[in-house]
Amino acid sequence: MFTRRDFSRAAASLAVVLGSGATARAAGPSGAKFEIMKTDDEWKKILTKEQFHVLRKHGTERAGTSPLDKVYEPGTYHCAGCDLPLFASDTKFDSGTGWPSFYKPIEKAVGSTVDSSFFMTRTEIHCARCGGHLGHVFEDGPKPTGLRYCMNGVAMKFVPKTTG
């Protein structure tokens, strides 16, 4: 049986093959203003090539390539562009998709827009502070929200919880 998750994986793989998204778009909603705004040249100075492609040009990393997919230690996942805390580790789950997945973001950490690329309509998730593209949200996640925030690991960094 072909599930929505299988369809999501196939669509994401197709996106990678076709050039990883609508690369001509700026990050975030068209014309949106964010607390942190930089030119492409400024972003390129602080991001890796892959981070820039995903965060600023709406790219998608290949499934299964992010080391963050298998990180389950206590801590927080931050935006790789501006360091805003996005997701708490206790909301992370193994979705089996090959991307880090969460059922709920930290309050007011993310925003959303409609993404109509690749002949489908999805809800795109971006950082609320810098507008960086993080991934998409789907309605096939676990309780309590039923949502699956399927994020690009390269768009985030993991900050372990310190004890003491």
Image (cartoon, rainbow, N blue to C red):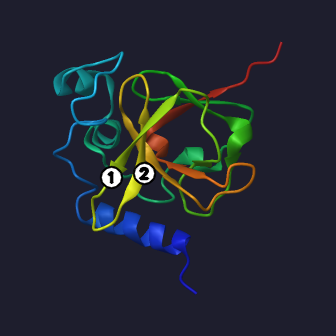
Indicate the secondary structure of the residue bearing disc 1. Answer: strand
Q: How many dots with numbers?
A: 2
Q: Amino acid at mark 2?
A: Thr
Please state if 50 lies on the left or on the right of 77 as rendered: left
Indicate the secondary structure of the residue bearing disc 2. Answer: strand
User: Could you tell me residue 32's position as x and y percent?
Assistant: 27, 28
- Residue that label 1 marks: 115
Q: Is residue 13 above or below residue 125?
A: below
Residue plotted at (63% across, 41% down) = 104
Looking at the rendered image, the quarter that the C terminus falls into is top right
Q: Amino acid at mark 1?
A: Asp
Camera-side residue: 47 or 115? 115
Q: Is residue 85 above or below residue 100?
A: above
- In three-dimensional space, the C-alpha distance between marks 2 and 1, rounded to whole angstroms, equals 6 Å
- Residue that label 2 marks: 123
Answer whether labels 2 and 1 touch (C-beta < 8 Å): yes
Instruction: In the displayed orientation, state which residue is furthest to the right.
Output: 164
Please state if 163 lies on the left or on the right of 58 as rendered: right
Residue plotted at (23% across, 59% down) = 19
Is the residue marked by circle 2 packed among few (<14), some (14-19), or many (20+) residues within 10 Å?
some
Q: Is residue 160 above or below residue 99?
A: above
Residue plotted at (27% across, 54% down) = 21
> In terms of image quadrants, where is residue 53?
top left
User: Could you tell me residue 134's position as x and y percent?
Assistant: 43, 41
Looking at the rendered image, the quarter that the N terminus falls into is bottom right
Residue plotted at (46% across, 67% down) = 8
Q: Is residue 121 above or below residue 130?
A: below
User: Could you tell me residue 34's position as x and y percent?
Assistant: 33, 21
